[in-house]
Amino acid sequence: MTDYVYQLIAIIIYMAAMLYIGYYSYKKTANLTDFMLGGRSLGPGVTALSAGAADMSGWLLMGLPGAIYATGLVEAWIAIGLTVGAYLNWLLVAPRLRVYSQVSNDSITIPSFLENRLKDTSRLLRVVSGIIILVFFTFYVSSGMVAGGVFFDESFGLDYHTGLLIVSAVVIAYTLFGGFLAVSYTDVVQGLVMFLALILVPVIGLFLVGGSDGAAESIRSVDPARLSLIEGATALGVLSSIAWGLGYFGQPHIIVRFMAISSVKETKQARRIGIGWMALSLLGAIATGLIGIAYYQQNAGETLSDPEAIFISLGQVIFHPFIAGIMLAAVLAAVMSTISSQLIVTSSALIEDLYKAVINKDASDKHFVLLGRIAVLFVAVVAMFIAWEKNTTILDLVAYAWAGFGAAFGPVILLSLFWRKLTTWGALAGMVVGATTVVIWGNNETLKGLIYEIVPGFILCLIVAVIVSLVTYRKNAEIDREFDEAITLLKQER
């Protein structure tokens, strides 16, 4: 058999496993809460790996190693910022959101939580939140589909559009039928595959380039600055990279996992598993990029046209074709886990936060689940349309969507959990200003070159939300009662 056949067998086995998990989850999905939130029954391991796999996407195995390969260690500041941000998210947001979302009318989505938490009877907050989720997640899902197309192009020489269609079809199938449970269970498998791949590729690759000394010598011969965290960096550039960590507080597809965990007590164990997985995976991705520089320096006759394919390229060089196929499946795992998580959250925004809240709230659960599945298909098709012309890098698409969510929702989520005086109008004004700032800043090359758009967006959202809340605040006994109840329950469950 040829190398490609071995690799293709591994990919087919992986995809078949994902579809089986989707079928298994379909049999366990009985109502809308099951479809959107898995019945709030996830254990700490599933929650941690699901959040991590949903978070990292193709960026972890393609975007980050590619950036390190092309530029050097200076790109690692993003990984540092993300690790700090993720830890604070687990520490500050996870336990409070788990309790508070249940206290506030058993909310199952971020927009419904904000509406219930702030007692907004106008439905405006829920609708605006749902629209922001729709807009930015469509770009986010699109970035994953681009990664899928690039994957098949680089790995098997398939046409980019063919790869795009294959990845989209499989991920749509298991998400559409299995809902949140399918997304979470497949994320666990995908998270483990990604983790093993990111450990094995750099560890074995290190021997291939002559150990740490050989790798360092080869990298220095290309450019000594590639091994420096600060060489060529600017203060604003480092701040922009670290600021990626701010985005965690506002990512609906990540923080919805906190609402689904079975109890507050388990958030501590989940945090340890999640941050451990993340730190080692990020180190593996960085090491992959560096070893890629050394390998191609030592094999001068070979070239790599696309830096974002460095992980794929090393996997094919290092391993037997079947094992290389499993390594390649790790890339698909990263891509598909994030697409599926984002599709289910976008579906919930369309059905739970727009259709059910505004148009028809009295239909049966069966009706809402059917519409949820149609919503998954609709958003996926729109995202595929955006991804059809690969006119930007994966990292650019992810950066834009990440900033949009971080700036629009991050400050509002933190204020809603820690400050009882946040008001509907304060949250609305903050979200609109944060999202608008990201859109304007992110589409202006001059401003974008100064600092990552999440920084001004997050700061302005926070300032506006606080000022407008102080102006519009009126004491509400029910809000105060729920705020106190959430704190009491949090202490009890801990």
Image (spheres, helix red, strand yellow):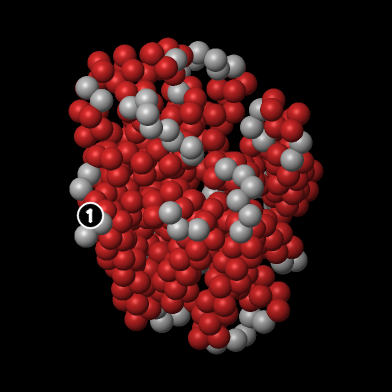
**Residue 116 can be seen, yes or no:** no
Q: Residue at x 21, y 60 (%)?
A: 1
Q: Residue at x 63, y 80 (%)?
A: 361
Residue 466, image quadrant = top right
Report the front residue among 297 and 480: 297
- Image coordinates of residue 385 in percent, x first then y, are 64, 63
Q: Residue at x 63, y 55 (%)?
A: 389
Report the number of discs. Answer: 1
Q: Residue at x 38, y 32 (%)?
A: 302
**Residue 395 can be seen, yes or no:** yes
Circle 1 sits in a helix, a strand or a loop, which is it?
Answer: helix
- Image coordinates of residue 68 in percent, x first then y, are 44, 29
Q: Which residue is mark 1?
A: 322
Crowd tier of the residue under label 1, counting other residues whose Cα lies within 10 Å: few below 14, some 14–19, many 20 or above: some
Residue 121, image quadrant = bottom right
Report the front residue among 312 and 494: 312
- Image coordinates of residue 234 in percent, x first then y, are 59, 16
Residue 469, compared with residue 478, is above or below; it is: above
Residue 275, image quadrant = top left
- Image coordinates of residue 233 in percent, x first then y, are 55, 17
The three-letter code of the residue at mark 1 reads Phe
